[in-house]
Image (cartoon, helix red, strand yellow):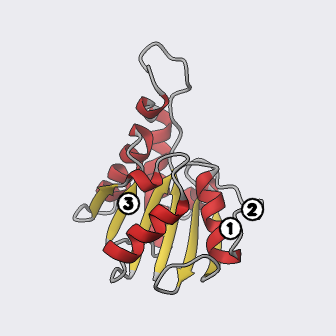
Amino acid sequence: MDLYLLRHAIAEERGKATVTTDAERPLTTEGRKKLREIAAGMAREGCLPAVILASPYVRARDTALLVAEVQGGGVEVVLSAALAPGAPPERLLAELNQKHAAARVILLVGHEPDLGELVASLITGRESAGIRIKKGGLAKLQVETPVTPGGATLEWLLTPRQLRARA
């Protein structure tokens, strides 16, 4: 299975008058503009998911929906509490194995430091490997099913700038 991990695009800063909780932070206009280019670059790199799992936080949900739109629609976007900040990674692995094991390409949209820790866990079996994904950055893993810690190979990790250059 190809498993892609995308950090949400640039979001409004905390503390804006229109944002009352961290979960409600929307994407900025600049974030949406750059994300359109990132999504086009993702498609050129072969990231054409059958399903997109996204954190229910507004910025991650909107990132997932915009990626699906740019890539032509028709991609199922599923909100998953297992991708919310601080959710235990075991919950996400169980969801992948129980509900999405047959998918050949899956995109996960979430937050840092959780995504970097997930990459570390999947490739090393440990949560810490110093991996960080920038806002709009994308990692590609080759994962054996069932998905287990230490059962993946990191194929690449691209910055938003690198993805936009491929658009």
Secondary structure beneath label 1: helix
Residue lying farthest top?
Answer: 17
- Mark 3 / mark 1, whichever is N-terminal: 3
**Position above or below: 30 against 44:** above
From the top left corner, tell me how far across and down residue 104 is, in percent.
Answer: 38, 82
Q: Position of residue 112 (x, y in %)?
A: 61, 49
Q: Determine whether label 2 and label 1 are within 8 Å by CB.
A: yes
Using the image, determine if residue 165 lies above or below residue 96.
above
The residue drawn where x is 51% and y is 87% is 144
Taking the image as shown, residue 98 lies to the left or right of residue 167, namely left
Quadrant assignment, res 33: top left
Q: In the rendering, which numbered label is found on residue 120?
A: 1
For the residue labelled by badge 3, is the local secondary structure a helix, a strand or a loop? strand
Going from the N terminus, do you reach mark 2 or mark 1 first? 1
Disc 2 element = loop
Of circles 3 and 2, the one toward us is 2
**Label 2 neighbourhood size at 10 Å, few (<14), some (14-19), many (20+)?**
few
- Which label number is shown at residue 53? 3
Query: In which quadrant of the rendered image does the N terminus lie?
Result: bottom left
Q: CA distance from mark 3 to mark 2?
A: 23 Å
User: Within 10 angstroms of label 1, few (less than 14), some, or many (20 or more) residues?
Assistant: many
